[in-house]
Image (cartoon, grey):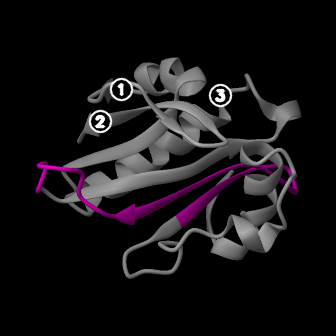
């Protein structure tokens, strides 16, 4: 089941999945977590929060339409490959279409780029490195 959740609910999963448990959950906050228009989704398998994602209004580069950045997409290891990530992205897309957003974009890890392509995103940048995290692409999905 997908639910809107608080930003504090996702910090532990962000730390485990995206930072290899090397930080404190509080260090996994994004500056955009609480801005106007930001929202957070969680996929629950029973009572367990298995997948999380955060989105906030932000345009990318010269794309000045009504854009949202997707950040912090993470699924706990034992729940990967079950389709929870696709379900939560589809839910976010449907929600943002109702809000008349024009596109979603993200800085996708290179290893996750196929997941995003399978979810309708296209690569719109050259590969770039985020220090300490690895190679990325900017990816966008028009809504």
Closer to the camera in the image, 38 or 137: 137
Q: Residue at x 29, y 29 (%)?
A: 125
Residue 94, percent from left and from top: 36, 48
Closer to the camera in the image, 1 or 17: 17
The circle drawn on residue 83 is 3
In the rendered structure, the answer to whether residue 7 lies left or right of residue 75 reads left
Res 58 quadrant in image: bottom left
Q: Main secondary structure of the magenta part?
A: strand
Seen in the picture, residue 76 relative to 7 is either above or below; the reply is above
From the image, state whether disc 1 or disc 3 is nearer to you: 1
Quadrant where the C terminus is found in the figure: top left
The residue identified by callout 2 is 141
Residue 75, percent from left and from top: 73, 40
Query: Mark 2 or mark 3, which is nearer the start of the sequence?
Result: 3
User: Is 137 contained in the magenta span?
Assistant: no
User: Is 46 contained in the magenta span?
Assistant: yes
Give the alpha-carbon distance from disc 1 to disc 3, as whole Å: 15 Å
Q: Residue at x 56, y 44 (%)?
A: 88
Q: Are marks 1 and 2 in contact (CB under 8 Å)?
A: yes
Q: Give the magenta range.
A: 40-64
Q: Which type of secondary structure does the marked residue at label 3 adopt?
A: loop
Q: Residue at x 64, y 39 (%)?
A: 133
Residue 118, percent from left and from top: 45, 19
Seen in the picture, residue 36 relative to 76 is either above or below; the reply is below
The residue identified by callout 1 is 120
Give the alpha-carbon distance from disc 3 to disc 2, as whole Å: 19 Å
Res 98 quadrant in image: bottom left
From the image, state whether disc 3 or disc 2 is nearer to you: 2
């Amino acid at each position: 089941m997908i639910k809107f959740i608080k930003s504090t609910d996702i910090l532990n999963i962000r730390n485990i999945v995206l930072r290899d448990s090397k930080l404190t959950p509080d260090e996994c906050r994004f500056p955009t977590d609480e801005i106007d228009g930001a929202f957070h989704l969680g996929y629950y398998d029973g009572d367990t929060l298995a997948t999380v994602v955060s989105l906030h209004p932000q345009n990318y580069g010269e794309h000045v339409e009504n854009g949202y950045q997707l950040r912090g997409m993470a699924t706990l290891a034992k729940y990967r490959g079950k389709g929870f990530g696709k379900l939560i992205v589809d839910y976010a897309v449907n929600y943002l279409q109702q809000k008349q957003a024009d596109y979603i974009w993200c800085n996708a890890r290179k290893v996750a780029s196929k997941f995003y392509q399978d979810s309708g995103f296209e690569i719109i940048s050259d590969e770039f490195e985020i220090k300490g995290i690895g190679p990325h692409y900017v990816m966008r999905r028009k809504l």
